[in-house]
Image (cartoon, rainbow, N blue to C red):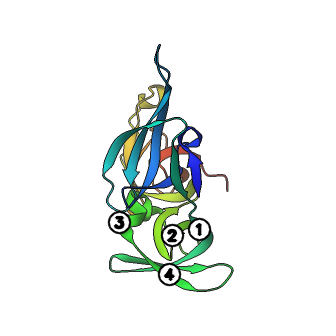
Amino acid sequence: MKVTAITLRKGHVMEYNGKLMAVSNYEIIQPGKGASVIQVELRDIRTGNKDNVRFRTQETVDRIRLDQADHQFLFVEGEECTFMNTETYEQISVPTEVIGDSAVFLQDGMVVSIESFEGEALGVQLPDHVILEVAEAEPVIKGQTATTSYKPAIMDNGARVMVPPHIDVGTRIVVRTEDSSYVERAKD
């Protein structure tokens, strides 16, 4: 689909020099004299390489629409995660490197959104938050709860999360999947 460059926004995917590139940042520059341009930071979806490109605002570019579908996580086998489409029940295997660091948060039956282009999975979007149980944590030192320092804890899935001092082993907490950060204690 041809669009003008000025309509590009963060998250849009376009074809540039024969590669699928995602817009990770953009800035419209209006010089004192001459035509406006849009400075776009592009990331190659397949390799992760970045490139900065300037387009004239009225220049046309090829914007790509990715297919998005909800899939249910089934299991991990080696370096592949297997998901099932919730509508068609077809199974798809996605390399863990496509999922990235957040693969550690996958749980049985979790519903994720998978973006694909021509049948190739390009990205997996996990839910914003997951509930995990603390498996290991340092004991609380008297008087430490008054400070705002955090301590490292290991969750039941092996993820490391910095938690407040009052969190003990066995406590269920809410963790943000985007950056592995503590949100709050889970409500039972």
Q: Secondary structure at mark 2?
A: strand
Are discs 2 and 1 less than 8 Å apart at CB? Answer: yes
Q: Which residue is mark 4?
A: 92
Q: Earlier in the sequence, mark 4 or mark 1?
A: 1
Tell me residue 153's x, y (percent): 39, 50
Label ID, residue 188? none
Q: Determine whether label 4 and label 3 are within 8 Å by CB.
A: no
Q: Decide if residue 65 is in sight here.
A: yes
Give the residue number, with chain letter if any, for mark 1.
67
From the image, tell me which residue sits under label 3: 97
Earlier in the chain: of badge 2 and badge 1, it is 1
Residue 84 in percent (x, y) is at 57, 81
* Furthest residue toward front: 34
Residue at x-position 47% and y-position 46%? 23
* Quadrant housing the N terminus: bottom right
Residue 67 image position (x, y, % from top left): 59, 68
The residue sitting at 42% across, 28% down in the picture is 143
Query: Helix, strand, or loop for circle 4?
Result: strand
SS for callout 1: strand
